[in-house]
Image (cartoon, grey):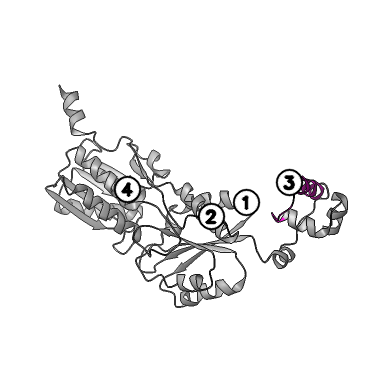
Amino acid sequence: MSTLKDVAKLAGVSTATVSLALNNGPVAAETRLRVQEAARALKYVPNAIGRSLTTGRTRTLLLVNMISESHADTVRKTSLFHYILEGLLSTATARGYGVRFDVISHDDPSTASYFEELVGGGTVDGVAIIPQFSRDVDQLAPLKRETFPYVVLRPGRFGTDDNFVDMGNYAGGEMVAKLFAASGAKRIAFINGPSTHFDALERERGFRDGLAAAKPEIMKIWYGDYTIEGGYVGMSEILREMRPDSVFCGNDYMAAGAIRRLLEAGLRVPNDVSVVGYDDNDVCTGLFPPLTSVNNHFLELGNALVESLLAQIEGQPFNKQQTLVPHLVERQSHRPPLAARRRKAR
């Protein structure tokens, strides 16, 4: 097995230069290339432990997804976070970093010490946190105190001094409201996520504000759990009280369940009822009709989380607080604007 000294000898440089070249240290581009070619020729594999001792870095990032034991586990029951992880992995790998993925509960007593141990453990260089639920986020205290690189996926209102990437849920909810208003919707149902979930709260806030001027005759809200079954149950409960002409679902999984229940009730989508989802994942094109949904740029969110962490780790300037604006992907599950329908009827 080749060693650092073997690479140094072949490249004609010192072992210190080899270490710098292979760890993105300050060496000339020509030297870095020569060292990399020598390492490839000798099939040299760096020792991770030795590299960590030399640089003080593990070249490993951590993504922590926080769940609540009182709600459905959307990490395991849906693919909601697959796209964020994919974006995070692609950017981290391109920069020579590995990624760990942990799922911890707000309700677990050991959570209080989890982040304290993380800061002192030396096992990762930075952490991205998805808090999900509207709970005290005490984990930020030790990270801030020790200036440990961190970034939070911020669904909406959060601390003004935190490092975060905002996924624009308010704007997404507002987009759906304006779509319904333009179509002349009057009897509106909203099958939302849990009432304590950050995303759900922000989407509802944007949706309510967007509908304020339209003044619908009735709006019924049901709080679900982001699963297909939750959407089915929510639609069943809503149909007991009203027949909506438009339904906004807090994610595409619940929209799938809602559409199934509407079809069972003899209601056609979109002829009788418009249905719009959220997240724009692969479920949308597997439904009939294909689902209109809000694309919240999960891949780009993952990229942004990594870029923020790496800038902090490497002592570079970074955007402390970023916002990505979602966009509406219109397919065939909603009625077109009222004006367009009137022109077609002439």
Amino acid on which the number 3 mark rests in the picture: Ala
Which amino acid, by three-letter code, is at mark 2?
Answer: Val
x%, y% of residue 341? 19, 29
Residue bearing mark 4: 172
Per the rendering, the mark at residue 95 is 1
Whether residue 261 is visible, yes or no, is no
Distance of mark 1 from mark 2, alpha carbons?
10 Å
The secondary structure type at the circle numbered 4 is helix
Q: Quadrant of residue 333?
A: top left
At a point 18% along the width and 24% down the height, the residue shown is: 343
Cα–Cα gap, marks 3 and 4: 45 Å
Disc 4 from disc 1: Cα separation: 31 Å
In terms of secondary structure, where does tag 3 sit? helix
Q: Main secondary structure of the magenta part?
A: helix
Q: Nearer the viewer, mark 3 or mark 4?
A: 3
Of labels 4 and 1, earlier in sequence is 1
Q: Give the label, 1 or 3, closer to the camera.
A: 3
Return the residue at label 3.
29
**In this rendering, position of residue 261 left or right of residue 19:** left
Q: Is residue 316 left or right of residue 179?
A: right
Label placed on residue 301: none
Numbered disc 1: secondary structure: loop
Against 261, residue 61 (above or below) is below
Q: Which mark is residue 306?
A: 2
Where does the N terminus fall, quadrant-wise?
bottom right
**Which range of residues does the magenta coloring cover?**
23-40
* Mark 1 to mark 3 CA distance (whole Å): 16 Å
Label 3 crowd bin: few (<14), some (14–19), many (20+), radius 10 Å: few
Residue nearer the viewer, 257 or 223: 223
